[in-house]
């Protein structure tokens, strides 16, 4: 099986797992950590162009698990995290990872945040090394081993 086919199958499995836990994923910590993760993956290469911002925003708006929250609120939070990262990536990354780390208190939420990062990372057909590295750092922030996610 080609890498991309295997990855697409993995993201479909992750989405199915997220949907099974949708009822448990309603906290403010999950909401914030998810948007922080989306912004971090979008900015993994140090920049976020308008097309990338729009593509990620579209994915956020259509993700069934994230529909537990108001789309405009998610968009506002995502944009705030992206702005923080684009202003000063190194400093912003520390702050964003701290918000992701708040999901560590609930293992279900922590795993869901990482799964969302992987789904967002592969949404454009390429889960590149920068995105993988960022998701590995997020795993550390929530106290989960990257190997659990084949990272």
Image: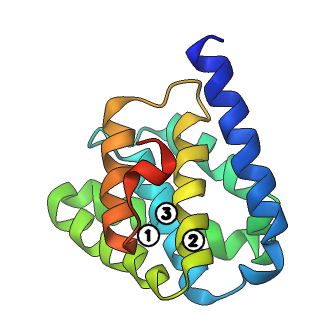
The residue located at (45%, 67%) in the rendering is 36
| 25 shown above or below 41 | below
Q: Residues within 10 Å of mark 3 (few under 14, many from 20)?
A: some
Image quarter of the C terminus:
top left
Tag 2 residue: 76
Q: Give the spatial CA distance, label 2 vs label 3.
A: 5 Å
Left or right: residue 79 versus residue 62 is left
Q: Are marks 3 and 1 in contact (CB under 8 Å)?
A: yes
Q: Please name whichever residue, 10 or 100, is drawn nearer the observer in this view of the structure.
A: 10
Count of all numbered marks drawn on residues in the image: 3
Quadrant assignment for the N terminus = top right
- Name the residue carrying label 1: 80
Q: Residues within 10 Å of mark 1 (few under 14, many from 20)?
A: some
Q: Which residue is mark 3?
A: 79
| Residue 93 visible, this orientation | yes
What residue appears at the point 68 percent right and 19 percent down from the top-left corner?
A: 5
């Amino acid at each position: 099986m080609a890498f991309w086919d295997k990855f697409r199958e993995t993201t479909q499995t992750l989405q199915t797992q997220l949907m099974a836990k949708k009822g448990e994923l309603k906290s403010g910590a999950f909401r914030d950590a998810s948007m922080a993760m989306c912004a971090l993956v979008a900015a993994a290469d140090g920049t976020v162009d308008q097309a990338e911002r729009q593509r990620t925003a579209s994915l956020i708006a259509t993700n069934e698990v994230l529909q537990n929250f108001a789309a405009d609120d998610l968009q506002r939070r995502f944009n705030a995290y992206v702005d923080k990262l684009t202003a000063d990536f190194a400093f912003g990354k520390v702050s964003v990872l701290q918000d992701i780390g708040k999901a560590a208190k609930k293992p279900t939420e922590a795993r869901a945040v990482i799964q969302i990062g992987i789904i967002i990372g592969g949404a454009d057909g390429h889960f590149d090394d920068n995105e993988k590295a960022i998701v590995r750092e997020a795993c550390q922030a929530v106290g989960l081993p990257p190997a659990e996610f084949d990272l």
